[in-house]
Image (cartoon, helix red, strand yellow):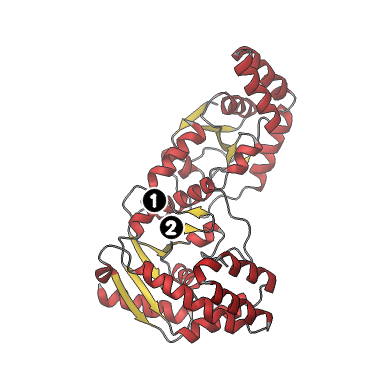
Amino acid sequence: MSIHKISVEDLLQLAAQAPVLDVRSPGEYKHAHIPGAYSLALFSDEERKIIGTSYKQESREKAIKHGLDFFGVKMKSLVEEVEKIIKEYKPAPTPTPTPDLKPQTLNTVLVHCWRGGMRSSAVAWLLNFYGFEVYLLEGGYKAYRNWALAQFEKEQQFNILGGYTGSGKTELLQALKQSGYAIIDLEGLANHKGSAFGALGQPPQPTQEMFENMLANCIEQNNGQLCWLEDESQRIGSLNIPHGFWNTMRRKPVYFMDIPFEERLDYITAGYGKISKEQLINAIVRIKKRLSPLEAKTAIGFLVEDDVKGCFRILLNYYDKNYLKALYNRENPGSLLNKIACSGVDAVSNSEKLLSCITVNT
């Protein structure tokens, strides 16, 4: 059985039916990896450091010998780990690979390292020798990164979902998805809701590189079809939407869900009212200079007095002003903006109004 060399595009097709094995070190994998890939580290972070130092200070041959010392004792455990991965792996319900790329056996694996060099070749040889059908990514993770970055420069078909803070845009995106529309949930990918309070109740944010990888895969999975995204600032927490992608967003139609202030205030209060006072106060302090010292002090005072709604009334006014400014800070905002009047924050009914508006306009 031979080892098949494949491109990034082929790997992404095959990944729906076979596991991707990332044989880089745990630290490299933790920083960023191909979404869905399994970590099958050939060397630990310390072992990789020893090999790298040997290569630089001694010779290539000496570094390889160090690598063989580490590799030899791991061969059996690597094979057993792959057997476990394959046993637990669940292929996508609807196969996407083209017939010539379809895995020939149930023991198919996709392997890569950083540049498609010795690490992935060594593991590919071992797994192929044992009896696995092995596909090896040419150019390794570096080739994947180049592919990912290229996705952000492509012209995309987007509709942008707009609305002031507290409009329930994330829930509306999910309602559109349930109706069969393609979406990209940028805040979901970023683990952040996009304001000074956006990290509250969320898991840690991914690295910038991992965020970009997940976004690139979403673009690829949508396969050029019209896609809905929430209107965002370029920065989401500590992460930045890739510049080319964000510029494309700014040129696309915005469907602004116009929901009364008091309805949005009730929605925000219900959501963030569950967060501890200490966390809310810390978030207010972070925007103190932009909010103004007096308003920040007043908002914190409301919290201390258990008047959460009074606090968020101040904050919502602040975010409304900022969003309105950003909304019109784009080329030809008048031609791009479509306002849709809604009586409340209800994802199902608002999605119906939105889709009705789209149908009328088309």
Q: Hey, what amino acid is under mark 1?
A: His
For the C terminus, the image quarter is bottom left
Residue 134: quadrant of the picture? top right
Q: Nearer the viewer, residue 202 or 81?
A: 202
Residue 116: image location, x then y, percent: 52, 28
Confirm whether residue 50 shows in the render: yes
Residue 94: numbered disc: none
Query: Label 2 neighbourhood size at 10 Å, few (<14), some (14-19), many (20+)?
Result: some
173 or 128, nearer to the observer: 173
- Number of disc labels: 2
Task: Examine the rendering and report whether any part of residue 167 can be seen.
Answer: no
Do the numbered discs 1 and 2 sit on residues whose CB atoms are within 8 Å?
A: yes
SS label for mark 1: helix
Q: Please, is residue 324 above or below residue 25 in the view?
A: below
Which image quadrant is residue 283 in?
Answer: bottom right
Residue that appears at 67% across and 83% down: 306
Q: Residue 159 vs residue 142: left or right?
A: left
Residue bearing the label numbered 1: 243
Amino acid on which the number 2 mark rests in the picture: Gln
Q: Is residue 257 above or below residue 49?
A: below
Please give the residue where the numbered disc 2 appears in the rendered image.
234
Left-right relation of 241 to 93: left
Between residue 268 and residue 22, name the one nearer to us: 268
Q: Is residue 67 above or below residue 274?
A: above
Q: CA distance from mark 1 to mark 2?
A: 8 Å
Determine whether 33 is above or below 51 in the image: below
